[in-house]
Image (cartoon, helix red, strand yellow):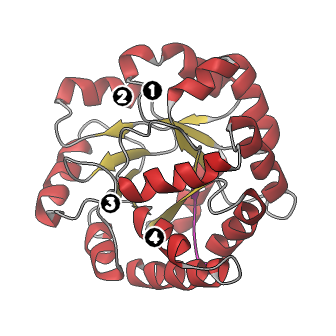
Amino acid sequence: MSRIAQCFEALAGGKALIPFITAGDPSPQLTVQLMHGLVEGGADIIELGVPFSDPMADGPVIQRASERALVHKVGLRQVLQMVAEFRRDNDHTPVVLMGYLNPVFAMGYQAFAAAAKAAGVDGVLTVDSPPEESADLSAALTANGLDPVFLIAPTTPPQRVAEIAKLARGYVYYVSLKGVTGAGHLDIDDVARKIAALREYLTVPIGVGFGIRDGATAKAISAAADAVVVGSRLVQEIEAATPETAKERLTRLVAELKAAIR
């Protein structure tokens, strides 16, 4: 059983909190500290963003995070090194890499999957790798004990959800709105209806992200979802902090979010 599956099993019906930060933001030296800060605040799973020059699904907040990381030359290999460093002190919190296909394709699917396993990665979500084109990558990941995590959008038709259900492991990430990360027009009732429909096809847990910015929204979403994903709000906290205060501020915000969904 993967660390992600173990996490959801241990929650015994409770809801998982999955915070997102971008590796290398605000500096490579702080990323592992921030990851530990997320866990101290109550993170159940960490989504760690791989910096990319053209993050098409992300709004300006996470775009700026990628830009800050890229100034420090942080790429996929450096991100894997950060995960390996995190694993020296934490061997239980699942880590999912979230990013875009280009760096993975450039490294090679088999080489990437083997390196990710060796580093201690548990799952991989490539935003721009549709299920119709992801068989080779998914095979390499599953052969190495890694969970392929897929996005499902409000516009995803049922037949495509059924195809994703065949490949998805760990959990699926339901995009709660039509837009980019950080958008604010979240319709909670509509999200609940969509999740109920998705459960006809999916057996893995459903996490919901995009547009979740505070405890009240996280609590409302958690009533229907198995996990709540929060990204832009946390990245904004990093952006507003100094290097000395970033971990404390992240830990405090994650603790507030976790308390809200308990």
- Badge 4 marks a residue whose secondary structure is helix
Question: Which corner quadrant holds the C terminus?
Answer: bottom left
Q: In the drawing, does residue 21 fall left or right of residue 84?
A: left
* Cα–Cα gap, marks 3 and 2: 25 Å
Question: Could you tell me the amino acid type at mark 4?
Answer: Gln
Disc with the residue nearer the chain's start (3 vs 1): 1
**In this rendering, the label closer to the viewer, 3 or 1:** 3
Q: Are marks 1 and 2 in contact (CB under 8 Å)?
A: yes
Kindly identify which residue carries mark 3.
Answer: 182
Q: Determine whether 131 is above or below 71 in the image.
A: above
Q: Residues within 10 Å of mark 3 (few under 14, many from 20)?
A: many
Q: Nearer the viewer, mark 1 or mark 4?
A: 4
Question: Which residues fall within the magenta stretch?
Answer: 41-47
Q: Position of residue 155 (x, y in %)?
A: 16, 37
Give the CA distance from mark 4 to mark 3. Answer: 10 Å
User: Mark 4 = which residue?
Assistant: 236
User: Which numbered circle lies on residue 247?
Assistant: none
Q: CA distance from mark 3 to mark 1?
A: 27 Å
